[in-house]
Amino acid sequence: MKETPEIPLTGGRGNAGVVRIGNTVRRPPTPNSDFVSRLLAHLEDVGFAGAPRALGSDEEGRDVVDYLDGMVPANLALHDDAVLIQAAGLIRRYHDATSALVASPAACKVGIEVVCHNDLSPCNFVFRSGLPVGLIDFDAASPGARAYDLGYAVWLWLDLGSEDVEPSKQRRRLALFLDAYGPDGPLQSDVVAAILVRQGILVAEGRRKGDLAMSRWAEDCGTWTQLHLATPSLRLRP
């Protein structure tokens, strides 16, 4: 019998060791593997179709999930309104599907509302017919606040800081994205604050890894965000 070949997956980012075998994806385990497996099982149980199903582990100890057919972008791009609306709606459905996992008075007191994906870049979405329909790469998932997850998503989906988009257009696109997420979602000021936090984290990560290009890019994006989106009180933050 001919063995099914392993096909390295090159779409998206951070895919070292990730391969497709037939209709499954295999990836090296992480300290978060058990949590992610339980999260994906919960998403399947509640009928959220925008995530892969957890299928356990293979004989090599790799995590196994089913393969979501479609295109995964390799880089950021300028997306039109229809794509942004679809992405924001998908994120909202994901957040709502996870809220029951963390619902408690104690969690609420410390700002935990959902299970954050924590890397909601377009490069972790599966597209079909030009629209995002699924999320992948849940390795960094953890309990957190909606605004924290949305901040990173807004930064990368809108490509904030790009010289190709006028600030006024980005402000309109930001409002569009948040409206599509839902009028009862986080305040825009909270999302902008989260964007600045996530940009600062990436600056520090780039410096720690010696990736000066990444840290400079994140720093430039932070400067843009401070100048064009932040309120006066946020601009005073270090």
Image: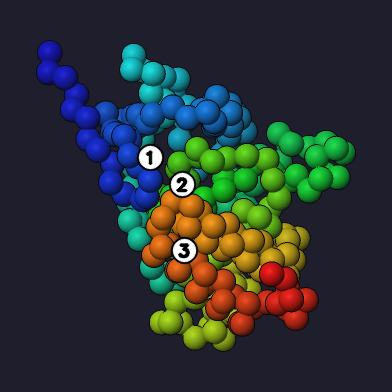
Write down the quadrant of residue 59 in the picture: top left
Amino acid type, callout 1: Leu
Q: Earlier in the sequence, mark 2 or mark 1?
A: 1
Q: Nearer the viewer, residue 184 or 148?
A: 148
Helix, strand, or loop for circle 1? Answer: loop
Helix, strand, or loop for circle 2? Answer: strand
Residue that label 2 marks: 134
- Label 2, label 1: how far apart the Cα atoms are: 7 Å
In the rendering, at what x and y percent does residue 97 appear? 65, 41
Picture residue at 68% right of the left edge, 57% below the top: 147
Q: Quadrant of the N terminus?
A: top left
In the rendering, at what x and y percent does residue 83 appear? 46, 64
In the rendering, at what x and y percent does residue 149 appear? 62, 53
Residue that label 1 marks: 68
Picture residue at 58% right of the left edge, 28% below the top: 35
Helix, strand, or loop for circle 3? Answer: helix
Amino acid type, callout 3: Ser
Q: Nearer the viewer, residue 13 or 51?
A: 13
Q: Is residue 63 above or below residue 111?
A: above
Q: Are marks 3 and 1 in contact (CB under 8 Å)?
A: no
Let me know if residue 82 appears in the view.
Answer: no
- Label 3, label 2: how far apart the Cα atoms are: 29 Å
Q: Is residue 1 left or right of residue 168?
A: left
Residue that label 3 marks: 215
Q: Are marks 2 and 1 in contact (CB under 8 Å)?
A: yes
Amino acid type, callout 2: Gly
Q: Residues within 10 Å of mark 1 (few under 14, many from 20)?
A: many
Q: Is residue 157 above or below residue 54?
A: below
Q: Is residue 234 left or right of residue 3?
A: right
Q: Residues within 10 Å of mark 2 (few under 14, many from 20)?
A: many
